[in-house]
Amino acid sequence: MIKKALVLAALAAFTFNGAIAADTTLNTPASATVQTQQVAPAETAPAVKDKAELDAPPPPPCPKAQKAKSDFEKRMKLTDEQKQKAKELRMKGHEQMEPIMIKIKELKQEKEMVIRSRMAVEMQKEKIAEIDAQIKDLKKQAHELRMQNMKEFESILTDKQKKELQKMKKEGRKKFEKARKKCIKDGNCKPMQQPVPMPRPATPIEE
């Protein structure tokens, strides 16, 4: 129910790259994990996909994402030239964001292994805190990259289109707040990220 509300809140948005659209799985070999003699042999990190799987093309965007992209372009009245530039920005954003999200994926795997290990409690807490700090820093980098990509996208718009984009952002925030209040009232809230009504570089991996 809340997902449906968020989709409506982000109808003005279109995503970077079909999923430079967040949410197929791309992985790289996991980073070095904590080694201790007390770790049970069976408690290993989840398997990581090989290079062939990494190089495989992403699946096509879902119908809802395609419709949102189409609706956005129509409302913004983007020219063919602007659409092409936006596509180039999506590709650029994907290349910049992918290594950050892959690293976050690796750190989450490492954290899971530490949690499942039998190392001393204090040592475990310290390691988890260290990993969480790294993940926080990477998410900050991802956010800054999204903001930079947004500025680059806005730079190809006319003044009239920029005003329309600001209007769409306000509409998106209102719908987001309405959905958030409803989920709080219903008691079924999940972590929510306010949608950004522009070609945001969503990534191949969930944060």
Image (cartoon, grey):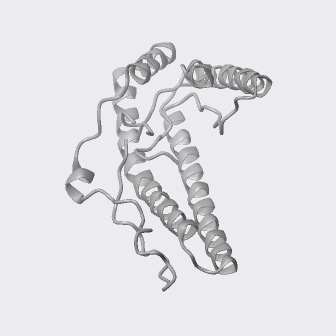
Q: In this rendering, is residue 205 above or below 28? A: above
Q: Residue at 44% of width from left, 68% of height from top?
A: 43
Q: Position of residue 38 (x, y in %)?
A: 52, 82
In front here: 186 or 10? Answer: 186
Q: In this rendering, is residue 20 above or below 84? A: below
| Quarter residue 176 falls in | top right
Q: Residue furthest bottom?
A: 37
Q: Residue furthest left?
A: 52
Q: Residue at 33% of width from left, 59% of height from top?
A: 48
In front here: 203 or 199? Answer: 203
Q: Quadrant of the N terminus?
A: top right
* Apparent side of residue 85 relative to residue 143 in the rendered image (left or right): left
In front here: 57 or 172? Answer: 57
Q: Residue at 45% of width from left, 13% of height from top?
A: 74
Q: Position of residue 65 (x, y in %)?
A: 43, 24
Q: Position of residue 81 (x, y in %)?
A: 35, 26
* Apparent side of residue 157 relative to residue 56 in the rendered image (left or right): right
| Quarter residue 91 falls in | top left
* Apparent side of residue 54 relative to residue 130 in the rendered image (left or right): left
Q: How many marks?
A: 0
In front here: 204 or 89? Answer: 204
Q: In this rendering, is residue 30 above or below 64? A: below
Q: In this rendering, is residue 64 above or below 115? A: above
Q: Residue at 64% of width from left, 67% of height from top?
A: 133
| Quarter residue 163 falls in | top right
